[in-house]
Each structure stands twice: as structure tokens, then as C-alpha cells.
């Protein structure tokens, strides 16, 4: 039975970014250097990073709030407009010294030719103000997603996890980097295959992977560890053992933002009362749907429901 997702209340905290796309066509090579000349015909702006996680949860029918930091700049204003138009409750703290993160992608003939990033780190005082707002609004939500993109917006993540767990909340973390100790005590971590290898090293068998994953889960006092494994599907490691979901058999068009879809779907389903294995099965299905779309995209409740029905 597919749950009533309108009852789910999700708080997303983390690094937001503006995904900007320049679409065009290539008709010649530049006379100045051996590079293609792209004649830009269309520009699109989409929510990226933690904002895309929030957008995915909202697309599934949940009530969603996003807490983050942006700059006092044009990109920050564009992000806020997109968030408001998506129906996401926004709690954006402004930092005059911050350049809102932009990922600019140049796309021609359905191929990404170039990505240009603009970013720096937020001010410590602004982050303290964000933490105080987090304390204030936390009681209104069932599940907290901490979306770490390594941009400096989750400096206080250890304290955020502690506060949420003490309040009885489910805490999901999309990790970054090699220092996983800062995520200790969370309910669930969702590293991808390469991110996990950075922390536990390379494994040479499924049994070796299980041992390394279980050791990490126990050392961090996590309820579970969900490893997304690209074409190998995803595996959930918990005190009850491991559960594997094979990858969905469909054409992969673009994997950017797929991890956002997975963690958002997990959060919504756990907020609706599903157990982790059932929530993972739906997250795996949602991930399979979103990789068939171009760029950072979402899966709607209707699309996911249709995917479930099509399997009978």
C-alpha cells in the first residue's frame, strides 16, 4: 500500500546551490583555441544541492522546510524565487560576504560540454544564527535531512544531530569527505560507493563490504548505513543484517541529483511510518526514474505510484 505522503513533515538543512544551464548548439570550432563554440539558445535555472533534496521531498507530497545560507546576490534571489514557487517553506539566512554557490553547465546536443563553479564559505556568525533557528523550528518536523555538499554550511552538524536525536527525530545524512565522525549518532547515512571507499577503503567481495560497513555503522552508532552503488543498486546495512535492492532496469540519461532523490524519498517514506527496507525499495525505484531525466530533476508522487503499479 502506497502511503499518504501529505502527512510527512521534512526539514532539510544543508548547502544549497543554483544549477544554471545554458543550452545551445555547436556549429564550429573557435578560431582562437581548439574548443567548440556554443551558440546559447536557452537558459534554465534549477534548485541544486540541499534545495534539490527539498524539492524532491515536496514533489512526493510532503510538507517541506529548507534551512540554509545564501549570499546577498542575484543567485541567492533566484534560489529564493525558485523555492517559493515550488511551495517549499524557506528559512534562508543572508551572508553579505558569501557568493551563493552556482554550478553553470553548458549543454549542446544533449551533452554537457563544461561546468563552471562559483562558491566560497559562509560566515561563522551567520551559521550560529542558523543553528538557533534550527533549535526553534525542529519540533515541527518528523524527519531531518542534513545534506552535506562540503561547502561549509553544516559546520554545526554534530550539534544538529544531537539536538534532533534528543527530540526523537529521524536524522538522515548525505555525507561528504573522509571525516564521518562528525555524523556520529545519526539514524542513517547514505554514502555512494566512491564516498564509502574514501572512508573504509576498497573491498574485494560482498562479505568484505558487509564487514567494513558494519564496522563503520557500529563505530558511529548509526541505526543503518545505506550505500548507493550505481549500476549495482543499493544495500542497506543495519543491526538486522543487510538487504540489497538491484538497480532498476532502465536507460541512464543523467545521474546528477540522483542521490538527492534517493535521500528525499527515504525521508518521506520513513516519516510515513514505513520501515527502512520498504523505504529503500521505493527510494531505489525513484532513483531509477530520475536518472532517465536531464539534469537535477524530481520524481513526483504520481510517477512513483505509477512505477509501483506497473510492477503489479
Image: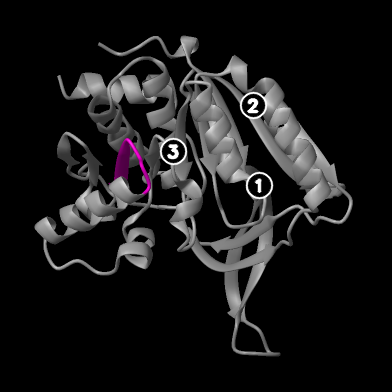
Within 10 Å of disc 1 (Cα), the crowding (few <14, some 14-19, many 20+) is few
Query: Alpha carbon of mark 1 to alpha carbon of mark 2: how far?
Result: 15 Å
Does 71 appear in magenta? no
* Residue closest to the eye, 239 or 119: 239
Question: Would residue 77 be visible to someone looking at this image?
Answer: no
Where's residue 152, x and y in %? 66, 55
The quadrant the C terminus occupies is: top left
**What is the secondary structure assignment of the residue under circle 2?**
loop
Can you identify the residue that label 3 sits on? 186
**What is the secondary structure assignment of the residue under circle 3?**
loop
Can you identify the residue that label 1 sits on? 44
The quadrant the N terminus occupies is: top left
**What is the secondary structure assignment of the residue under circle 1?**
strand
Identify the mark nearer the N-term, 3 or 1: 1
* Residue closest to the eye, 249 or 71: 71
Compared across the picture, whether 163 is left or right of 79 comes to left
Snapshot colouring: one colour
Within 10 Å of disc 3 (Cα), the crowding (few <14, some 14-19, many 20+) is many
Can you identify the residue that label 2 sits on? 86
Contact, CB < 8 Å: mark 1 with mark 2? Answer: no
* Residue closest to the eye, 56 or 236: 236
Within 10 Å of disc 2 (Cα), the crowding (few <14, some 14-19, many 20+) is some
- Kindly identify the residue that appears in the image at 37 percent across and 63 percent down: 199
Amino acid at each position: 500500500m502506497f502511503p499518504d505522503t501529505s502527512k510527512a513533515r521534512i526539514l532539510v538543512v544543508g548547502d544549497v546551490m543554483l544549477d544554471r544551464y545554458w543550452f545551445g548548439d555547436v556549429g564550429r570550432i573557435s578560431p582562437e583555441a581548439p574548443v567548440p563554440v556554443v551558440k546559447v539558445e536557452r537558459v534554465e535555472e534549477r534548485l541544486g544541492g540541499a534545495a534539490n533534496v527539498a524539492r524532491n521531498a515536496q514533489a512526493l507530497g510532503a510538507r517541506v522546510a529548507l534551512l540554509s545560507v545564501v549570499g546577498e546576490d542575484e543567485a541567492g534571489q533566484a534560489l529564493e524565487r525558485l523555492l517559493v514557487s515550488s511551495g517549499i517553506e524557506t528559512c534562508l539566512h543572508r551572508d553579505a560576504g558569501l557568493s551563493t554557490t552556482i554550478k553553470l553547465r553548458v549543454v549542446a546536443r544533449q551533452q554537457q560540454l563544461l561546468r563552471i563553479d562559483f562558491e566560497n564559505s559562509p560566515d561563522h556568525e551567520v551559521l550560529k544564527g542558523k543553528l538557533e533557528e534550527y533549535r526553534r523550528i525542529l519540533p515541527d518536523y518528523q524527519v531531518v535531512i542534513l545534506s552535506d555538499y562540503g561547502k561549509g554550511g553544516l559546520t554545526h552538524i554534530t550539534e544538529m544531530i544531537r539536538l534532533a536525536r534528543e527530540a526523537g527525530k529521524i536524522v538522515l545524512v548525505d555525507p561528504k569527505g573522509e571525516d564521518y565522525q562528525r555524523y556520529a549518532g545519526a539514524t542513517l547515512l547514505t554514502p555512494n560507493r566512491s564516498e564509502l571507499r574514501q572512508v573504509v577503503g576498497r573491498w574485494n567481495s560482498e562479505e568484505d563490504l558487509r564487514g567494513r560497513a558494519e564496522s563503520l555503522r557500529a563505530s558511529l552508532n548509526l541505526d543503518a548505513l545505506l550505500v548507493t552503488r550505481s549500476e549495482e543498486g543499493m544495500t542497506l546495512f543495519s543491526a538486522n543484517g543487510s538487504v540489497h535492492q538491484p538497480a532498476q532496469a532502465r536507460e541512464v540519461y543523467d545521474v546528477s541529483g540522483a542521490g538527492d532523490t534517493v535521500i528525499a524519498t527515504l525521508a518521506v517514506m520513513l516519516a510515513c511510518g514505513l520501515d527502512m527496507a520498504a523505504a529503500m525499495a521505493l527510494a531505489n525505484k525513484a532513483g531509477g526514474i530520475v536518472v532517465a531525466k536531464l539534469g537535477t530533476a524530481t520524481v513526483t508522487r504520481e510517477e512513483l505510484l505509477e512505477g509501483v503499479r506497473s510492477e503489479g
